Amino acid sequence: MSEEMEPARERLRRLNITMFLPVLAIAGTMAVAKDARTWWAAIVLSAGVIASMVAFTRWAAGEVLRVAVPCLAVTALVWPFGVAVGSSTAFFGIMSVGSHVVPQLPRHRVVAAIGLVVFVALAGASRLLLSGEDVGDVLFRWVLVPAGTTVVLTGLMFPNKRFYDLVAELEEARERAAELAVIRERVRFAGDLHDIQGHTLHVVKLKAALARKLVDSDTERAKQELGEIHALVADTITQTKELAYAQRRLNLSAELENARNLFEAADIRVRVNREADVDPGAGELLGQVLRETTTNILRHAQATRVRITLGETSISIVNDGAAGGPLPRLRGLAALEQRVTAGGGALEVGQDDGQFRTAAVFPLPGRQEAR
């Protein structure tokens, strides 16, 4: 797995273990070497260091609560033992384990933090009962330093937990964004496939019906229609392959010619008005609008005339034969509106006196990038 693809939490885990686990081990070893007077004292104090290392490793993996109870139990016993044998650094284990466990608790974290500090302080204060040392020195070495260090380290671990939570949320958001991108690409692919094969099926249907009518009266014309059907299917196969390999781009001139042929095959008169030269950057978007609108007219209208008007970055298609009443709720129009909006444009549909108008306008590519 490359570093770019590796989850951020896993990289942080490895970084923490690489940087801080050796420091933890060295500090614990030095504390044991400094305070252990006998071999059995060294074993007990080492148990606290080992428990703290286990807890740190599991904390780095986000699983510290799984080992919280045994690690806390061991270090909670090591600290009073250290007080009894004169090891003032024996609080190292309970401080380390407690500061990693408490912020990860699902609830009552503040109460647990207070309880941790009170335990460290009380266990240290019991040194007053076991030695005749100066009270001030005992309170400083065995109460103030251990309890204060525990407060500072535990307090630092709370914002640390929030940081890790934010990293987790960002990873989840990235995963959702990736899933949405996949879904959008599937919808786009499905829409393009619909555009390609929907047109083909309509033309094939119309030309097949015409060929069947002509097969007895005009055999040559029927053969010509069948040849065009064959060529159309072959072209559609090519376009589908190009779509599958992300090589397909719409050409507005080709779409205009295709729409003209479709309408004429359906006995629909077509007029194309060019109010301005189409901007090359908007041609593909305008071609998408024309293709989807052509399909909708052939499927849902009883049209006899279609007027296509082209501007620099706009297109308007008006057809007659629209059904009366409210605007139809067509899935194709909904999908087209999403595509137009994604391209930074605006789609307008309207129906008046038996005529249906579909219009789209896009910003000039230079202006769109400037925004």
Image (spheres, helix red, strand yellow):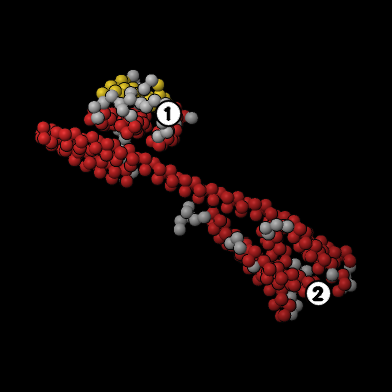
Residue 324 picture location, percent across and down:
39, 25
**Foreground residue, 114 or 135?**
114
Q: Is residue 93 left or right of residue 329?
A: right
Quarter of the figure with residue 363: top left
The residue under the point 30% across, 20% down is 273
Task: Quickly name the residue at label 1.
Answer: 327
Asked if labels 2 and 1 touch by Cβ distance under 8 angstroms, the answer is no
Identify the disc placed on residue 355. none
Dot placed on the residue nearer the N-terminal end, 1 or 2: 2
The residue under the point 65% across, 52% down is 162
| Quadrant position of the N terminus in the picture | bottom left
Residue 334 picture location, percent across and down:
42, 35
The tally of labels here is: 2
The residue under the point 87% across, 72% down is 129
Q: In the rendered view, tell whether residue 130 sits above or below residue 279.
A: below
Quarter of the figure with residue 301: top left
Quarter of the figure with residue 17: bottom right
Residue 222 picture location, percent across and down:
14, 35
Kind of residue indicated by mark 1? Leu
The residue under the point 43% across, 47% down is 182
Kind of residue indicated by mark 2? Ala
Task: Quickly name the residue at label 2.
Answer: 84
